[in-house]
Image (tube, rainbow, N blue to C red):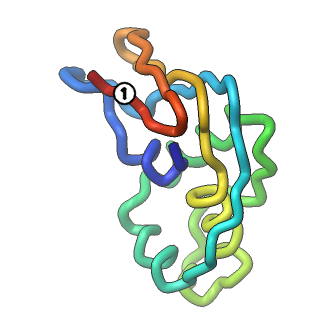
Amino acid sequence: MKLITHNMLMSPGTRNGFPLAIEVESLEEVEADFNPEFIARMVEKLDYPALLQTVASLSVVEGTLPPQVPEKYAEDEEFLKALHHVLLEVEIVEGSLVCPETARKFPIKEGIPSML
C-alpha cells in the first residue's frame, strides 16, 4: 500500500477514524517515474499534516518534507521530488492499519489493505 492511498483511507463507520496508524511488518522502497504535474495536482487533495504524522511514525522512511506546503509548490522541484518519493515510492507490504477511534486493526497483505 502506497502512502498516497493511506492518506485517503478512513476507518469505516467512524467519525474520527482518520488518519489510520500504521503498524509495519514489511516496507519497501520502489522506484517510480517522477511526474511533477501529477504530484502538484495531488497536493490539494492530500491531508498534508496527516501525511507528515505518518512519515514521522515510520522512522524507517527518510523524510525531507517541510513542515508546511511551500507557497509556490508547483514550481518547487525539490519539494515535488520529496513528496513523490513519500507518496509513490514507499510501500507498506505487510502490516496493519489501526483506527484511532476504535483501535480496530485492518490487515495489509501483499501491499493490499483490507478494510472489511
**Percent coordinates x, y for residue 1 in the rendering:** 51, 43
Q: Is residue 114 above or below residue 112?
A: above
Q: Position of residue 81 (x, y in %)?
A: 68, 74
Which residue appears at 54% of the width and 48% of the height? 3
Left or right: residue 81 versus residue 18 is: right
Q: Which amino acid does the dot numbered 1 rest on?
A: Ser
Q: Residues within 10 Å of mark 1 (few under 14, many from 20)?
A: few
As drawn, the residue found furthest toward the front would be 110
Is 94 located above or below residue 92 in the figure? above
Residue 56 quadrant: top right
The mark total stands at 1
Q: Position of residue 62 (x, y in %)?
A: 80, 50
Q: Residue at 46%, 68% (x, y): give it.
A: 43
Under tag 1, what secondary structure?
loop
Rendered-image quadrant of the C terminus: top left
Q: Identify the residue at horizontal 51%, vertical 28% (top origin).
A: 109
Horizontally, residue 64 falls left or right of residue 104, namely: right
Please name the residue that numbered disc 1 is placed on.
114
**Residue projecting furthest to the top:** 103
- Which residue is depicted at the point 65% across and 58% down? 89
In percent of width and height, residue 59 lies at 78, 35
Q: Residue furthest left?
A: 13
Q: Is residue 41 above or below residue 101?
A: below
The image quadrant that residue 99 belongs to is: top left
Instruction: Determine the image quadrant of residue 79.
Output: bottom right
79 relative to 1 in the view: left or right: right
